[in-house]
């Protein structure tokens, strides 16, 4: 019964991932696309966690942690770029 629940949940998360990919491609503004990319990262983490539970293994926990860190750094970088127009600020001597 639990295995069927995991399969249904995987299907639902995958369908939501398709909607997010559509929002990344067709999004009206760039911030909408950034939010959709962040949500795709979260859905990817959920898919890996569900597969890990289905296979009854802890082998994917490092992958989940790494994807979470990368998704966070990517979102912060995109947000900073949208706000200031540059990601790495350099002091310029004039």
Image: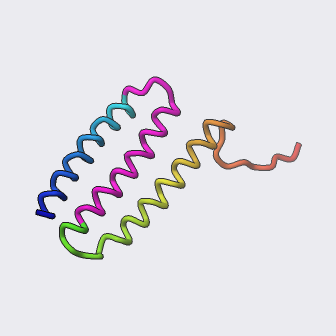
- Residue that protrudes farthest toward the right in the picture: 94
State the residue lying farthest toward the front: 1
Look at the image and tell me in which quarter the N terminus lies.
bottom left
Residue occupying image coordinates x 15% and y 64%: 2
Closer to the camera in the image, 86 or 72 = 72
> Relative to 56, is 91 on the left or the right?
right
Q: Is residue 93 left or right of residue 10?
A: right
In this picture the colour scheme is: rainbow
- Residue 69 on image: x %, y %: 49, 61
At a point 54% along the width and 54% down the height, the residue shown is 73
Whole-percent x and y of residue 26? 37, 26
From the viewer's side, name the closer residue of 85 and 54. 54
Up/down of 68 relative to 8, above or below: below
In the displayed structure image, the side of residue 88 where residue 19 appears, left or right: left
Image position, residue 17 (x, y; %): 30, 42
Where, by quadrant of the figure, is residue 6 drawn? Answer: bottom left
Q: Quadrant of the C terminus?
A: top right
The verdict on residue 90 being magenta is: no
**Residue range highlighted in magenta:** 26-51
Q: Residue furthest top?
A: 28
Residue shown at 29%/61% (left/top)? 48
Number of on-image labels:
0
Does the magenta segment cover residue 28? yes
Q: Nearer the viewer, residue 68 or 77?
A: 68
Q: Position of residue 60 (x, y in %)?
A: 31, 70
Q: Main secondary structure of the magenta part?
A: helix
């Amino acid at each position: 019964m639990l295995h069927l629940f995991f399969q249904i949940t995987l299907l639902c998360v995958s369908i939501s991932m398709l909607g997010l990919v559509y929002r990344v491609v067709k999004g009206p503004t760039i911030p909408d696309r950034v939010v959709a990319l962040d949500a795709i990262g979260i859905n990817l983490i959920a898919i890996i966690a569900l597969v890990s539970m289905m296979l009854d293994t802890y082998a994917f926990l490092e992958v989940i942690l790494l994807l979470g860190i990368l998704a966070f750094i990517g979102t912060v970088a995109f947000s900073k770029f949208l706000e200031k127009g540059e990601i790495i600020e350099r002091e310029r001597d004039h």
